[in-house]
Image (cartoon, rainbow, N blue to C red):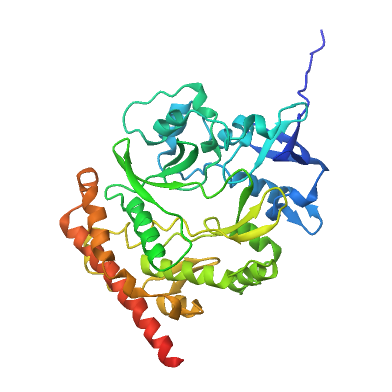
Amino acid sequence: MPFNFSFRKPKTYLLMHKNIPVLSAEYDMDKAEFTKLLEVSNFEHVPYSAREDNTINLKKLNHWYRWRGIPDYRLGLDRLLNRLDIEDPRELLSKHYALSVSDHYWLKEESNTKTYEDISYFTHRFDQDGFGKAMFALGRAEPEESALKTPNNTLAGYQKKAWFHKNADLYLYKGGTFPCQLEPIHEKLASEIGKRLGMDVIPYTTTIYENQVVSVCKNMLDEHHDLITADEVLSFKKAGKDEFEYYSYVKILEEKGIANAQKALDDMLVLDFIMMNTDRHNQNLGVIINADTMQWEKVAPIFDTGTGLACLRADEEVEGWTEVYNYKLFNSNKIPDNVSAYLIKDLSRYDFKSLKDILQYYYDAMKETQVITGITERRIKSQVRLLASRIKTIYKFQKKAAQKG
């Protein structure tokens, strides 16, 4: 009797942008990747970083798509996957239409008749506690299957994080690194510094969730806007092998008609300088665009400024900090203080005297959560001294720049 071979025909999926079909392709659900492009329906809405000349690069498309998901280096990933009964984080990306609340792209089978309004997490609620506890809980957590129907499946980044509903809005809870858990406090501190210096920053607060300190911020996007990252922006004009991407980035924004692009980047550089930010990569800065018209509107407010002020260093390192700080920015991992300050075009606009009581603000913020973090009084005082030295240093740079005229 001959063997009866049966082959599963690859299914065709549509990549949608709101209700606009962007392209059709064969898609591997297990690997969360497009395996074969079939047709491009609307090139104008193709993700920028997936474009190559007037075509779509399949490898770049998959790179863009996977960056929307939970990375394999997520803190607490093994525990999360175990609780969700998932073997690989890429599986999550294929769940519930690959929906996100950082953009309006989604995936559906060709025969599916649902519209974006039927499923969008901007307007539909989801099981926030199911995923939230699976992500953050230190003790036992057994979420329901509904925990997989969430925008948290497409939430990139290293730290523990999850979206939550508060009234009619979406808020991101983001944790810190044990034992001090300083990153959430630093997000709050950075937003306060930015506000006092007249910057466009995402407002952060802190709260306690599952006995951990988390930062809380409202989603910067709504039903009509996408965030395109610096990685996507730079796909328009790649810097040369030995060129610093910063200059390419500024030029692209200016060519796209983004108002005050240089000021926005100055603001980011000043805030990162004060905070000693070690995590300014091409995925946590960018531009907000209109998702309906694809019009570039403005530089995104400053966000993700928590990993700084030597928060990952040992107590004794913070206490005796004397080394020059090196920045990570675009395609450079080691930009020293003086070079970073040189990139700031106009330091004169910042009133650093507005930070006169920010040291007390920082001290109080660490004391408020001390019962949770167990941070020592000695470490708190060392952190405050480090912040004071950063403000003093950039103030000196400002005076030196003024003297040069």
Q: Residue visible at 35% across and 33% down?
A: 137
Left/right placement of residue 396 relative to residue 347 reads left
Indicate left or right for 7 with 120 as reference: right
Residue 112 at what x, y percent from top left?
74, 26
Q: How many marks?
A: 0
Of residues 211 and 178, the one drawn nearer to the viewer in this rendering: 211
Q: Identify the residue shown where x is 75% and y is 36%.
A: 14
* Picture quadrant where residue 314 is located: bottom left
The answer to whether one can see residue 323 in this image is no
Which residue is situated farthest in the top direction here? 1
In the image, residue 342 above or below residue 384: below
Q: Quadrant of the N terminus?
A: top right
Q: Is 122 positioned to the left or the right of 385 in the image?
A: right
Q: Residue furthest bottom?
A: 404
Residue 269 position in % (x across, y down): 46, 70
Image position of 332 with respect to 80: above or below = below
Q: Is residue 280 visible?
A: yes
Of all residues, the one furthest to the front in this rendering is 167
Horizontal side, residue 37 vs residue 81: left or right: right
Residue 52, horizontal then vertical, whole percent: 76, 57
Q: Whole-percent x and y of residue 173?
A: 41, 43
